[in-house]
Amino acid sequence: MSEQFAEIVFPVSIKQIFTYRIPPSLTGLVQPGMRCSVSFGRRNTVGLVTGIISRPPANVKNIKSIDSLLDSVPSLTKDLLQLGQWISEYYYCSLGEALFAILPAGYRKNPKAFLQLNPDANEEKVAAVLEKVGALRGVKWKSLKEGKVPLTARTRALAEALKTESLGSLRLDGSFDSSRVKRTGKIGEAQEIPKLHTQQQEAFDAIVKPLNLSTFHTFLLHGVTGSGKTEVYLRAIAKVIEMGKQAIVLIPEIALTPQTVERFTSRFGDRVAVLHSRLATGERTLEWRRFALGEAKVAVGARSALFAPAQNLGLIVVDEEHESSYKQDDAPRYHARDAAVKRAQICGAVALLGSATPSMESVHNAKSGKYTLLKMPDRVNKKPLPKIKLVNLREEWSVRGADRPVLSMALEEAIRETIENKEQVLLFLNRRGFNTVTLCMKCGEQVHCPDCSVPVTTHGVYKSPSPSRGEGGVRVNLTLLCHYCNWSGPIPLKCSKCGDGTIQQVGLGTEKVEEEMKEKFPKARIARMDLDTTRKQGSHEEILTRFRRREIDLLVGTQMIAKGHDFPGVTLVGIVGADTGLALPDFRSSERVFQLLVQVAGRAGRADKEGMIYLQTFNPDHPSIQAAVTHDNEGFWERELELRRVLGYPPFSRLGLLMYRSKDERKAKMASERAAEILEREAKRFNVEINGPAPASMFRLRGHFRFQILLKSPKPLGIRQLLQTLDSRFETPSGVFRAVDLDPQSML
Ligand code: ADP
Ligand code: ZN
């Protein structure tokens, strides 16, 4: 057989495919999708095979050989290789970056390799080889014989010589041993399977059609909170399993939604593989394998569960498809919802996107016929949607003067009543910390992080009990904290600008709300759920469980408490401030506020008792707030779509965000200007509009100065081609970092 070569990629940003020789010992064994160990640069590392060729490209010299093959069957199936190719093209990253993101974390690193002597290798023969290779001080016969000499740059020549003389080979350590890994996931108790109500049945029937035909189709299931979307997912999955196929379920943040995961395990038991980023690598690998081997039929997990290796994929469910956490924020910057639709297309499967508040992109795709819209406008058992009462804080404050209360009188009264009735209260404010602004009362100068151009937040310093149990405890002091880089420091005594001494804190965070509630309602059991009280593993679950068991009367929290939870005891939701986020310089801010308000409101009144929402705002007339109050999805969509169309924003265009950053402001600025110049010159040809460069709205972040260029085009292809042109003309200078984000979810 003639010589063969493998095309191999690595998780690096250079867009290059590397060629390696397949040694005679591996001829016929190497396949695309397999991992191998090779020397790359000066290191020994894992590469992924993407193709086999019989002749190396003409310009490639000094071709190295593959050291060893790490897989006996491909780690990545054909459809995943294809998906990786699409991700690398669409999101403008290297194929290696895309494919290594698809590989499970435990598969990305090289297992340690050791030189292993053959049984017939005697000391004399090995000594001769050692001599031939040259002085390898430190390599002893004894350690060689015991297999203790690791493969390093220094011992590589020895390894090769032993191999050619048939005296030895490489042994890989740390290969996965499933018998040593325990599954820790709980399996939920089996529940009775309800009869589908009419709207669910109609949705289910529609989904079954393409399932039966094994054809690709995308559905957008728009069901209000509590309409029974999850039950529709469960039935569709049962159907898929019955057909001998597999399903993937994506949920936005798995740690936040243990209850959702339980609904899948209680229905399908052992046939569910949970791909949880907080699992130890070994257990995650085990779950991944159970799915790859077909033992598990359903894979449930966050973003990267999309890459679960199915043998025969029938369905991908994307729950809460509007969630921005589906977008990965470093390379490859893929959006899991859009990649899920792509994967379904590659596999001839059904993509089922569900939400009570779908993204404008999906709404647009449904309206234009690309997706089929399924509607469930009613709650299960015709339970009414909770009533929302608007409280105008501007009026409230003008009446009550200087004390600027956290709670309006109406909300305070409602809380008191709810607690007296032994029902539960959720208080929502999407700002963690104590005060959100620290400023000089004389000149108005705000205290900023020394490394970022963002105002710092104050946080309480607490005496026990520690905040990790969901409570602030006794506050003894305040410190400053930057939410972007975690810088922390004391509150300054004097203003750095005018030198005056009156520094004050204003603006409300969840910690302050918690503290005030404890003063106002000393007998109530009060807890807080935000990033600061949930740092410990399992703490989300602990707080949620305590709340569900009614050991907590009032739970204060950030958007964490808005996520799909089902709290039967909650009859009152107080939205302390609905306005956070409205003023963000991002074209999606209205959409985000609307979604969040509807989701928070949806937590109330899910059991027998009717729910009530108090929504406090300074902007009672804002369209997002008005639409949320009247549960008017259609109205909101229409307005928002029209606005986007007029301004030429997605979904009516595609955006690409180019970010140049450097510790040296001048360098970043110059690089972005140079790039913009080239882009400007070529933009017309590709039908792309260029905006910038301009300082990012968070101009400094972790000590880096950031300049951005926004690319806008009717089609993603134009942006990609323009970027290719840029890359062929301009190399990002050293000391400057460039990031490309296609379909960016954040413009900050
Ligand atoms: P969503 O995901 O749309 O918010 P869920 O699927 O969580 O809604 O359903 C809300 C509640 O109604 C859950 O407790 C669920 O068990 C219950 N439920 C769903 N479908 C039915 C049905 N057909 N009959 C009775 N109860 C149902
Ligand atoms: Zn900072």
Image: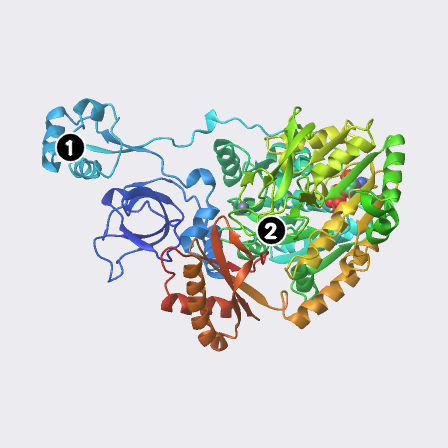
Q: Which is in the foreground here, disc 2 or disc 1?
A: 2
Q: Amino acid at mark 1?
A: Leu
Callout 2: SS: loop
In the rendered view, does 205 fall on the left or right side of 687? right
Tell me: residue 189, above or below residue 11.
above
Give coordinates of residue 210: x percent, y percent. 65, 56
- Which picture quadrant has residue 630? bottom right
Q: Which residue is mark 1?
A: 136
Residue indicated by mark 2: 498
Helix, strand or loop at disc 1?
Answer: loop
Q: Is mark 2 within 8 Å of ligand 2?
A: no
Whichever of labels 2 and 1 marks the residue nearer the N terminus, that label is: 1
Identified by mark 2, the residue type is Cys
Mark 2 crowd level (few <14, some 14–19, many ≥20, 10 Å Cα): few
Determine which quarter of the picture holds residue 561: top right
Q: Could one spot residue 301 in this view of the protein?
A: yes
